[in-house]
Amino acid sequence: MIKAVRGTRDLLPPQTALWNFVEAAARDVFRAYNFHEIRTPIFEATELFARGVGEETDVVAKEMYTWEDRGRAQSDQGQSLTLRPENTASVVRAYIEHKLGERGLQKLYYIGPQFRRERPQKGRYRQFYQIGAEVIGPTSAGSESPARDAEVLELLATLLDRLGIKDWTLELNSVGCPSDRAAYNDALRKALAPVVSGMCEDCKRRAVANPLRVFDCKVPADQPIIETLPRISQFLDEGCRNHFEQVQAILNAVGVRFTLNDRLVRGLDYYTRTAFEFTHGALGAQNAILGGGRYDGLSESLGGPHAPGIGFAIGEDRLVMALQELAAAVERKPEVYIAPMGSGMDREAATLARELRRHNLVVELGDETFRLKKSLETASKLGARFALIVGETEAKSGYFGLKNLGTGKQVSVPRADLAKEIQAAE
Ligand code: HAM
């Protein structure tokens, strides 16, 4: 038997109703904040992620699905392509490619699958889904303002609250800008030099190539060493400190609670200044429900204009996991089950179904070969509110038996009143 590939999964009904519910709520919130949807391809040139996300990150170094795409003709050049492991690099590529900066500040959101070859476990998949957003534009459009950071964070608090997720924690940090980063990297290199020989192979490489990535290390034996390393908060320059303080001041003013965590550096290289994660107690080891931050230099590193930006991506799989108790409430059930009784009645039933569906009712159709008992049992199993009985007598008289499956009460209703009668029973 052929099964779904390890780390991928099918999303089946009734679960998909919960996914749709979450996406509809997100789209509603995005609309209130004047975000617009962007859709980018699910594969891109490998170089986009290597340059955008960073060669030394786990995502790029270990987790990408990459292949050499041959040209169709001898003359066509092949190229290295990669299934997107995240969507920020693609959005910024699109921003540059379509000169979106000429239209002012861009507030873009996306919903879709991402691909990372991670070790699969609960809450961690190789094809997973993100609901994300990016605010990016020329500095003159306000893209660098701490007000953008605060608005994005407040949007997230609003969405989680609206979905009824209560015990979330916003962990907030500033990872500084390139000038702070140089000083911080120097300090990290100095601190690592005498101890790195006792660390894992990855850390030995990172300590030289990109010391910030040492914080991504999951090896238990390395953690006591990592704990002693200098903290980025000690290296922020005045501009970054001010920016960070203003973000916090707005969050306090609008009443979004947060926890400062100067160990939070995030696993992607493009971050500058504000970096954040929302965690959720009930999610276990994979407790980051979303992450994001500012990336003021990403556009330039991809060959574009200076275009500061900030964004986030919610792990939709994890968000849905945290909302399991809502699953039953959002499942859609048929409002009426039509039971054709006897030969020739499928035709009558189909006509009635067509009429009722035009009134926006959710209609399920039985089959004329079913006995009444079987039809009623099927209707109950589906959770239909009514069964509509369509036999020859009913078809001739124009009056139909409408049985309320909750109360068991049956009434005879003229054809023209059926939709009204069903809708009245909200
Ligand atoms: P990220 O932290 O790599 O950030 O991913 C964001 C979220 O995606 C995580 O917090 C997690 O909920 C979910 N996620 C990541 N990997 C997996 C996985 N293997 N299985 C299930 N869920 C997963 C980014 O991707 C950035 N692009 C976010 C961003 C946007 N920063 C600025 N703008």
Image: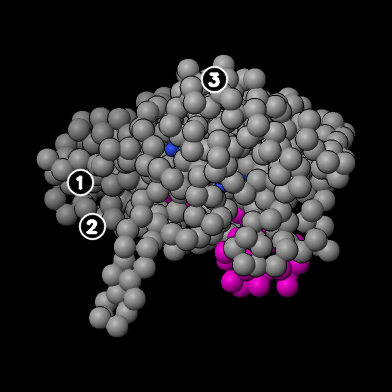
| Label 1 vs 2, first from the N-terminus | 2
The residue tagged 1 is 367
Label 3 sits on a secondary structure element that is helix
* Magenta stretch, residue numbers: 92-114
What amino acid is found at the position of numbered circle 3 in the picture? Gln
The residue tagged 3 is 223
Is 390 positioned to the left or the right of 137 in the image?
left
Q: Mark 3 CB in 8 Å range of ligand 1? A: no
What amino acid is found at the position of numbered circle 2 in the picture? Arg
What amino acid is found at the position of numbered circle 1 in the picture? Asp
Label 1 sits on a secondary structure element that is loop
- Circle 2 or circle 3, nearest the eye: 3
Is residue 88 visible in the rendered image? The answer is yes
The residue tagged 2 is 347
Q: Mark 1 CB in 8 Å range of ligand 1? A: no
Instruction: Say above or below: 121 vs 346.
Output: above
Q: Mark 2 CB in 8 Å range of ligand 1? A: no
Q: Residues within 10 Å of mark 2 (few under 14, many from 20)?
A: few
